[in-house]
Amino acid sequence: FINTYRLISPIAPFGGFKNSGFGRESGMEVIKDYSNVKTTWINTSNEPIGDPFVIR
């Protein structure tokens, strides 16, 4: 590493190539890979709310 000190950024994605079975590590891509979208209902008022999943 004499002439290539810090050649690769530690926040850059690492790994993964076509269908090798290995994904990305590091970087913002790993957050998308390891995250699941979830909906949460939070009542911020003092009034009780009805069940939002009941068809009225």
Image (cartoon, rainbow, N blue to C red):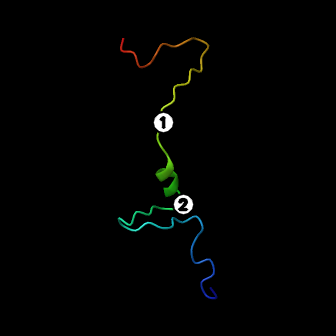
Q: Nearer the viewer, residue 22 or 54?
A: 22
Residue that appears at 48% across and 36% down: 38
Where is the N terminus found, in terms of image quarters? bottom right
Q: Position of residue 17 (x, y in %)?
A: 40, 68
SS class of the residue under badge 2? Answer: loop
Where is the C terminus found, in terms of image quarters? top left
Q: Nearer the viewer, residue 14 or 4?
A: 14
Q: Earlier in the sequence, mark 1 or mark 2?
A: 2
Work out how far the residue at label 1 is from the one at label 2, CA to CA, in angstroms.
22 Å
Q: Position of residue 55 (x, y in %)?
A: 36, 15
SS class of the residue under badge 1? Answer: loop
* Residue positioned most to the bottom: 2
Residue 51 position (above or below residue 12): above
Q: Quadrant of residue 8?
A: bottom right
**Disc 1 vs disc 2: which is toward the camera?**
1
Instruction: Identify residue for label 2.
Output: 27
Residue 39 position (above or below residue 5): above
Instruction: Identify residue for label 1.
Output: 38
